[in-house]
Image (tube, rainbow, N blue to C red):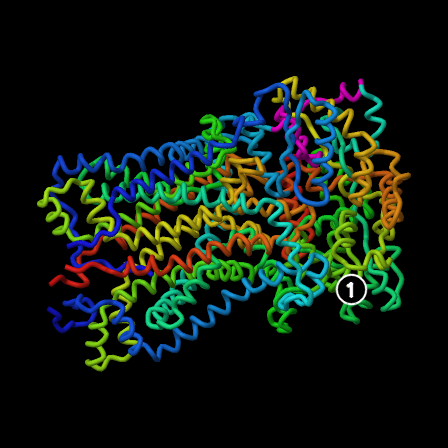
Amino acid sequence: MATRASWKGSELTAIDTSVPVGKGATSVGRLLRLNWLGGTFAWLWLVIVMVPIYWIVITSVKTQSNYFVTNSMLPPKDPTFANYQLVVQSGIVHYFLNSVVVSVGAVVPAVAISFMAAYAIVRGAGNRWLRTMNSMFLLGLAIPLQAVIIPVYLIIIRLHLYDTLLAIILPSIAFAIPLSVLVLSNFIRDVPRELFESMRMDGATEWGTLWRLTFPLTRPALVTVTIYNALGIWNGFLLPLVLTQSPDKRTIPLALVGFQGQFNVNVPAIAAAVTLTTLPIILLYAIGRRQLLSGLTAGFSR
Amino acid sequence: MTTLAPPAVRAQEPKTAGRGRSGAVVWMALPALLMFIAFAIIPLLGVLGLSFTTWDGIGAIHFTGLTSWKAELEDPELPHSLWVTFEIMIVSWLVQTPISILIGVFLAAFKRYRGLLAVLYFVPLLLSSVAISITYKALLDPNFGLGTGLGIDLLNQDWLGSTKLALWVLVFVVSWQYVPFHSLIYQGAVRQIPTSLFEAAQIDGAGRMRQFFSITLPTIRYTIITSSTLMVVGSLTFFDLIYVLTAGGPGDSTRALALEMYRKGFMADLMGPASVIAVILVLVGLLLAQLLRRLGGRGDESQLEGV
Amino acid sequence: MINSQISRRNLLGLTAGAAAAASLAACGSSGPKSTTGGSGGGSASYWSLSGPPGQPYRQAAVDRFDSANPSTKITANFFANDDYKQKIKTAIGAGQAPTMIWGWGGGGLKAYVDAGQVVDLTDWFGQNAAVKEKLLPSSFGAATVGGKIYAMPVETVQPIVLFYNKKVFEQVGVQPPQSWGDMMALVPKFKAKNIAPFSLAGQSRWTNMMWLEFLLDRTAGSDVFNNVFAGKQGSWSDPAVLDMLTKIQDLVKAGGFEKGFGSVVADQNADQALLYTGKAAMMVHGTWSYGIQKANGGTFVSSGSLGWMNFPPVEGGKGDPTNTVGNPGQYLSISSKATSAQQDIAKKFFSTTLVDDQEKAGWVKSGGVPVLANSDSLYAGDDAQFLKDISAIASKAKVFAQSWDQALSPTAADTLLDNIAKLFQLQVSPQQWVDNMNGVIGK
């Protein structure tokens, strides 16, 4: 089955799907062993990534009074955990949970309905309605949030949703749709027609085809889109600011408010807050990464 | 992490879409459509309407036809912000894409620390723009920041105060946050490239550079397009980070479209012209989307023909 | 065969579960959907700024009022400075303003007045003369629009002063400046010792503005700006303005400010840190800086190394040297869209809690000079001297001018800050500055 591959340009003719990827990675590793350019960049970039992170962590154990006096890049001689205490007392755990609820509550429905819409747009490409819908979604690619915020605010008020987490969730879903549909439909378009035909011949409905065939094949794009949207919503600032007001509805970006006085910013406390709220996600990612990876690189075999 | 390389044969656009089939799928798009209409289309129509008014945001709304349009289109700040927006978009793409691809390719091969690197790279993405701005403003402070801390005077430039440097600082910070994300995407894509191709090339005596340009790049073409789509579209409405880091300054050197819109609407109390800018943003987004579709949605050549 | 790891049922379940969880969490504890609307006559709402030093005292006032008036309730919400500005505009624009609107008076207040969003309090003050007398007269300037009072002065007066580091002056062996000439003469002396003569947070723009405010007032008196404020066309073309702008650029060119001042940000107190770590000799800043330097500067303030004075006069200038600029107070207005019951609650709050002794004591404790008169007796302890001096400056000032960016309309203020930044970056000439600013008079 494995024929010799012609590797020049667009004449690639055969794939060897019998070689599992894991093994392939090591072989590729041998071939790319001398990839010093990429290697240098990777390690250099790691340093660049870590320097500000390091700064945040060491600043979180400084006090406001020694913050400017000590060297900004060195840890303090007598670190203190008072900032962490202050941050926890201010309710950071609750704000963290709010952020989780909002992010999950927005991203999961957004990706799900975008996936369904992308599928419909690709599969029913001849349909006039679907083509119109597609163009309409594209209109929303560059929604200027600061401009639509006032109309959105009014709608939320009319729906009696002001100052609830749902007020943040619903518009977030809507704004995530265009990009998700764009990326997902591009991907679904690449699924071979024969596969759809064979599903249809097996008597599968469109709904069945959607979940049993298309879903596994587009999983990589789904993951990319999910992560991208989740990050945007997790760090989203304007919607929570305008659409909620009570302290108990605050999400993490707003939680830093308590440390930003009128003329004075408690930088060490903010550093502590940032560290505290980022740590759980990092742990989650570190643990869950394996699962994510093993499921996704299974590829598909005939 | 993931692969974005397409499977075997590219689908052809169905020439005969069965009435029944397309009818069945239309309803699948309905939930997205309804959400979108309710929270995106209607507000966008509201914004369009506002562009034909003069309103200071707190008083009564006066319908004034094309006054705001004329005022805004004549404002020299508008082409300037458009230019700044594109500058940021293009420069950050030029900086982020090569670095991400290089790192991605490296990570694909380098098994040993891959897990650790992937986790560490992920951290900047989790920080909100407030956190990032506070961090960088502190690090870039010419008197107490990174340069002084490390004793490297070269790092003590007027980073945020110089019109020439501020834009680069912005691009740097954005790249700092997102290169790791894109490199993880590319890593996944490169890992999916069958090694037989590389082996064959090796046998033919192709050097690493040739392999990279002839095998790697073409195969991840669609990944590049996806990643670029995310970058380009994201930078169009880029607001949070610029606002907290430079607020469009110094002067107006980093005043991208979204900032100009915010400034007009919420700081100068000119909601009419601000809405005009909003409409322009949406139209530019639409244009870009069409461009990206052309790049990503067509093309009939098969990269890897099936067995 | 296609490997499928997740059945659609699982995914649907996940989606439904997520949505259900979200809606439960979202709708669960919110209570009345909007405390800003007209629901429930027994409660009023109050939005203001968060964080130290003010938030605890604002909350304390609300708590005091609520315990003294158990049949009503004031709900307070606090937001960060810039966030507040955005949020209050959005709320007012959507007709959802809180009962009591906190603000800086001046041009912002005028915008509210023009839009009919705040209640005219002139008659109310007339009927409650006792309340009016408890407040410093100079604080009413920024609360008055078109001869009518639309806000109640609250909290503290915050003039701008020239701070200086006494230790640094001793080190270099010079005396604090008595005039503009002295200030310019001190520049090379400090520069020679690698100390920045003046600390400035150039990125924050309003810090630069303080310099212009003082210089203009000292050079030309208050008339020029009053004309601008009144909307007289071409008011900026007064020759004193060009003179003042040139002086500023001379100072910048002479290296009067620290290296890279355009990147230094006020909120993170980097400019103040320069002063108390001895890297800079002097700083023009608001009196609130005292409290910050006290908290963050270690023993700097307590050891008596911090000096302060009113901005020196300019030789040959027409301005009265006792004049000062800054925030003559903070202001609370009542939303005209609030129900009459809510307005009554607000008025009661104004006339009782906001002028009581605990209010006065609280703000003194925060390190500020209250807007309530006769606070001198409360100045005791370490901060006594500072508070007494500031109080003297505030009360002796013939004119206590409001910060320009608060006095002007937001449209003009925006252009102002823009041009000021460019001026300090030497990107715009004094004449261009004048022309640009003349273009937005009255807007």
Horizontal side of A135 relative to C65 (left or right) equals left
Residue B15 vertical position relative to residue C96 in the rendered view, above or below: below
Where residue C397 appears, x then y in whole percent? 86, 40
Q: Name the residue under label 1.
A: C278
Horizontal side of A183 relative to B91 (left or right) equals left
Amino acid carrying label 1: it is Gly
Q: Which of C13 and B306 is in front in this view?
A: C13
Residue located at (78% from left, 22% from top): C125
Quadrant showing the N terminus of chain A: bottom left
Residue B95 vertical position relative to residue A233 in the rendered view, above or below: below
Where residue B211 appears, x then y in whole percent? 26, 74
Report the residue that reaches farthest toward the left.
Answer: A201
Residue located at (76% from left, 18% from top): C123
Q: Does the magenta stretch include residue B154?
A: no
Say which element carries label 1.
Answer: loop
Report the residue that reaches farthest toward the right.
Answer: C377
Quadrant showing the C terminus of chain A: bottom left
Taking the image as drawn, is residue B75 in sight? Answer: no
Where residue A244 appears, x then y in whole percent? 53, 36
User: On the image, which quarter does residue B179 sit in?
Assistant: bottom left
Taking the image as drawn, is residue C98 in sight? Answer: yes
Mark 1: few/some/many CA within 10 Å (<14, 14-19, 20+)? some
Horizontal side of B234 relative to B159 (left or right) equals left
Residue A210 vertical position relative to residue C133 in the rendered view, above or below: below
Where residue C244 appears, x then y in whole percent? 76, 51
Q: Nearer the viewer, residue A286 or A157?
A: A286
Magenta residue span: C98-127
Q: Nearer the viewer, residue C243 or C398?
A: C398
The total number of labels drawn is: 1
User: On the image, which quarter does residue C70 sit in?
Assistant: top right
Residue B12 vertical position relative to residue C281 in the rendered view, above or below: above
Using the image, name the chain to which the residue with label 1 belongs: C
